[in-house]
Image (spheres, rainbow, N blue to C red):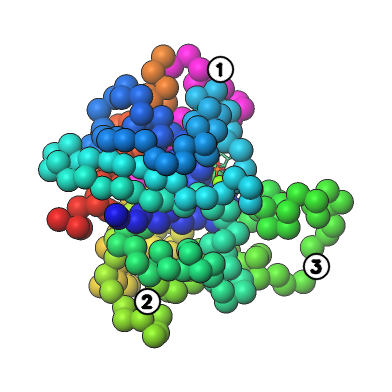
Amino acid sequence: MMHQLIIGMPNSGKSTFIAALRHLLLANEVTTELKLTGLAENEAHLNLLERDWLACQMVERTKPATEGWVQFHVRDQESGIESTLSIPDLRGEAFEQPACIGKCQKELHDSLIETDGILLFTNADREDDALLISDFSDILGEDETADQQPLHGFKPENMPEEVKIVEFLQFANRRPRYPRKRKVAVLISAWDIVENQHVLLPDKWLETHRPMLAQFLETNYDLWETRVYGISAQGGKLPEMQVTLEKIKKPSERIRVVGNCAKIHDLSAPLRWLMLEHR
Ligand SMILES: Nc1nc2c(ncn2[C@@H]2O[C@H](COP(=O)(O)OP(=O)(O)O)[C@@H](O)[C@H]2O)c(=O)[nH]1
Ligand SMILES: [Mg+2]
């Protein structure tokens, strides 16, 4: 079984991607590079995500009760290769721990070491990597934010997203392990926001808006083979765009993917690229 790892800080677009991918692969409304060959054992979490997504509603924030690993049994249309993608839909907090407290959940840590392919999410709706207040509610839990306490002094969680991502990636190659090459598909989510503002290619956007991450990946090209995609899994900003999105007859056509010759609605393209290494 292949393990693809989805990583990204709170609010980077992970759950929305999984919800849209689920519908895309199940509904067969548009052509995709990967096809679904069977249902996973535990479909409850996926069902919930897909339900929200289909209703043009923001998917529920991932909570301890709902987080978990989801599986997609797929076949590559071109080569016929079959594989099971096992991807975690975890709270963003799990990915912050290496940078914030120098630790990593065991299951997540093991799969980071073992994985050959990573889908790395960053949200384009966050121009300059500044932390949103919603991030704090993710970190603190809902109860603590209810009284809106002011934040004093330095907190590790306040580090920029890029620092946390780089630290997380560094974990994979750190002693006592031998460094080895892996693929990373950087998915810039909420790409609809970028497209509405100016014409920019995903690679360029990353260089401009996530310079530290872009430079880390470029410098360590012997360890990280990188591709950058712009994706819009939701199709537009919610709730503002809800009515417009509801009018699109085939929900799969809300999805947009830009970069590396991916077909316009095909969220499976970056996953397929990650799979190819195993040929
Ligand atoms: N405009 C836009 N916003 C998106 C898109 N995908 C996700 N978002 C928003 O980004 C935020 C975080 O999404 P979510 O999938 O919950 O992120 P997670 O915390 O990484 O699982 C939510 O407010 C979503 O509505 C998209 O394609 N376009
Ligand atoms: Mg989530």
Q: Earlier in the sequence, mark 2 or mark 1?
A: 2
Apparent side of residue 230 relative to residue 142 in the rendered image (left or right): left
Label 2 vs label 1: CA separation?
46 Å
Q: Position of residue 187 (x, y in %)?
A: 40, 49
Residue type at mark 2: give it: Asn
Residue 264 visible within the image: yes
Marks 2/1 in contact by CB < 8 Å: the verdict is no
Toward the viewer: 71 or 175? 71
User: Circle 1 is placed at which residue position?
Assistant: 243
Classify mark 2 as within 8 Å of ligand 1 or not, answering yes or no: no
User: Circle 3 is placed at which residue position?
Assistant: 152
User: Which region of the structure is painted magenta?
Assistant: 229-248
Decide whether residue 186 is among the magenta residues: no
Q: Which residue lies most toward the right here?
A: 147
Q: Earlier in the sequence, mark 3 or mark 2?
A: 3
Residue type at mark 3: give it: His
Q: Secondary structure at mark 3?
A: loop
Marks 3/2 in contact by CB < 8 Å: the verdict is no
Residue, x 17% and y 45% (percent of image)? 81
Q: Earlier in the sequence, mark 3 or mark 1?
A: 3
Toward the viewer: 80 or 249? 80
Q: Is residue 171 above or below residue 47?
A: below
Residue, x 58% and y 68% (percent of image)? 97
Toward the viewer: 185 or 175? 175
Q: Secondary structure at mark 1?
A: helix
Few, some or many residues within 10 Å of mark 1 (<14, 14–19, 20+): few
Image quadrant containing the N terminus: bottom left
User: Circle 2 is placed at which residue position?
Assistant: 173
Residue type at mark 1: give it: Val
Q: Secondary structure at mark 2?
A: loop
Toward the viewer: 108 or 16? 108
Q: Is residue 43 above or below residue 181?
A: above
